[in-house]
Image (spheres, rainbow, N blue to C red):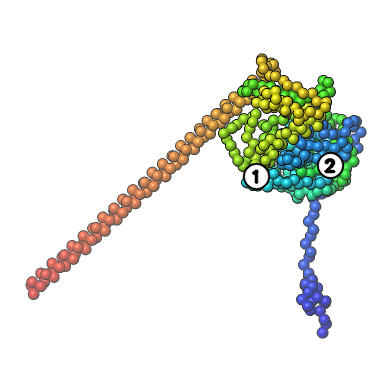
Amino acid sequence: VVPPPPGVADGHGEAQAGGFLGLTPPAAPAAPVEPEESEKDAPEDTRPRLSQPATFLVPDTTLNLVPSAVGGLLMTMSEGGLQYLLAGARAHVGLTGGRYMFEVRICELTRQEDVTSPQVKAIMPRNLLRLGFATSTAALLLGDSEDSVSFDSEGNFVFNRRRTQLTQRLPAGSVACVMLNLEEGSPDAYTISLFRDGERITRPQAIPDSLKGKPLFPMVTFKNMTVQVNFGPEPMADLPFKCRMVDDVAEADAVVTKYREPEDGKPEVLVPVFLPNEGTFHWLDWFLSNHPEYAEISDRKIVDWCMKSGLRRPFRDTTRHSNDRPEMNFGIYPLDDGSVKRLLTMAAGLQNRSVVVMEVEKNLSKEARTHVLRRVSTPGLKRVAKVMVGEPSDDYRQHVRDIILREKQVRLDKAFYSKQQDVAYQRQFEAKRRKLLAEAEAQEARAREELKAREEAGKEEVKEEMKEDVKQEVKEEVKEEVKEEV
């Protein structure tokens, strides 16, 4: 007796058993084939390079961001409720063509104790990173508008508040690289890609049409972490192909952001003094559009910042709608009691930046203005109270006219589309009414026909019954006659 191969006698070794029985063992499943990398090595480029390296200018960072002097490290303030606010920074070098990349390393993840009311759910994720590109006029927080496009550490592709899950989360210590391809004729032209530690983790994602043809600036947005931003010229993690970094950009492919310097070289703390209901925040919007080097500190700004950071108001109070003193009601104690605003005001005094402190009621009082200025008492700052009373300038008048015209156009468009919807609704209603009326008439006609058929059938039945009765009567009469004769 020939013994079976090892593994068969004791019930093990399915492949050996198949061979022993003369059967062909099943083939092993093939490994998934990775798609071929469509990006190629960057060719030699002899064009002149931009002389200055990319960096983050103070006006292009949020008030809660703390940059390091060297090494490209960025941190966020995370005490007293600031752990719930996103921080953002935009590089001062924008890209108009070519293919370039920059890297962000997640150095550490931090966590602070929650300071929320018991009714507020935990705000997730606690640590978040977004990296991508935006226009020069976009908000400093990625993913909130049509002016930016990005990836986040949760593995999402983010555009205009919409998130699309593409890959897994980015762990701490990993190096994330985002590449922008604006090369005409490239198979991946006008796309953005994400790499982790030198390996591609997403396919090229198309840039929205609203961003095409505009200079795009590298941006990062994060909270509760320390990150290191590398603009080059050498990468921290090599890609499967050679790609130039932002610091190696050609002059023809770059746009540089510049801000006007203060006349005396001193940043300014501006305290506008307005009378109530005299267009205070219209003036502020106009001033910031003409002076983007200033940062706004106001309750209105903090509420908008909170909403863009993903916070929601669990307790809504619709009794007070005000730009000057809006209701917070986020259920986060430092936000609701104004502690965050005080911290941001003190941070602005340490960042060598110009700010506008806007409070209509408090700015009318000398004591309140003095109390605010104590928080920004850093030497070298110029403190100015600007009284806005009298005839406005011509350019501000035109700004207000444009606002009125836009608001009027919005009302007219709303009325027009509402009327169009009403007309369409009336047409639909009339068509539905006619359809129902036709169905009702058809049903009524069928009911009449059935009734008529029933009546005719009933008449026939009555006739048959009468015939039977007559026959029965005749039979009985005949029987009676027979009996009488008998």
Residue type at the position of mark 2: Gln
Instruction: Report helix, strand or loop for mark 1.
Output: loop
Q: Are marks 2 and 1 in contact (CB under 8 Å)?
A: no
**Going by the picture, which residue comes out furthest to the left?**
485
Residue count near mark 2 (Cα–Cα under 10 Å), binned few <14, some 14–19, many ≥20: some
Q: Which residue is mark 2?
A: 228
Q: Quadrant of the C terminus?
A: bottom left
Quarter where residue 120 is shown:
top right
Q: Which residue is mark 1?
A: 117
Residue type at the position of mark 1: Ser
Where residue 177 appears, x then y in whole percent?
Answer: 82, 43
Nearest the eye: 163 or 315:
315
At a point 82% along the width and 34% down the height, the residue shown is 56
At a point 77% along the width and 23% down the height, the residue shown is 383
Residue count near mark 1 (Cα–Cα under 10 Å), binned few <14, some 14–19, many ≥20: few
Q: Earlier in the sequence, mark 2 or mark 1?
A: 1
Whether residue 161 appears in this view of the structure is no
Where residue 139 appears, x then y in whole percent?
Answer: 73, 33
Nearest the eye: 438 or 421:
421
**Going by the picture, which residue comes out furthest to the front?**
367
Where residue 402 appears, x then y in whole percent?
Answer: 65, 22
Quarter where residue 313 is shown:
top right
Quarter where residue 263 is shown:
top right
**Disc number placed over residue 399 in the picture, else none:** none
**Going by the picture, which residue comes out furthest to the bottom?**
1
Whether residue 45 appears in this view of the structure is yes
Nearest the eye: 380 or 323:
380
At a point 33% along the width and 48% down the height, the residue shown is 448
At a point 83% along the width and 35% down the height, the residue shown is 98
Nearest the eye: 417 or 217:
217
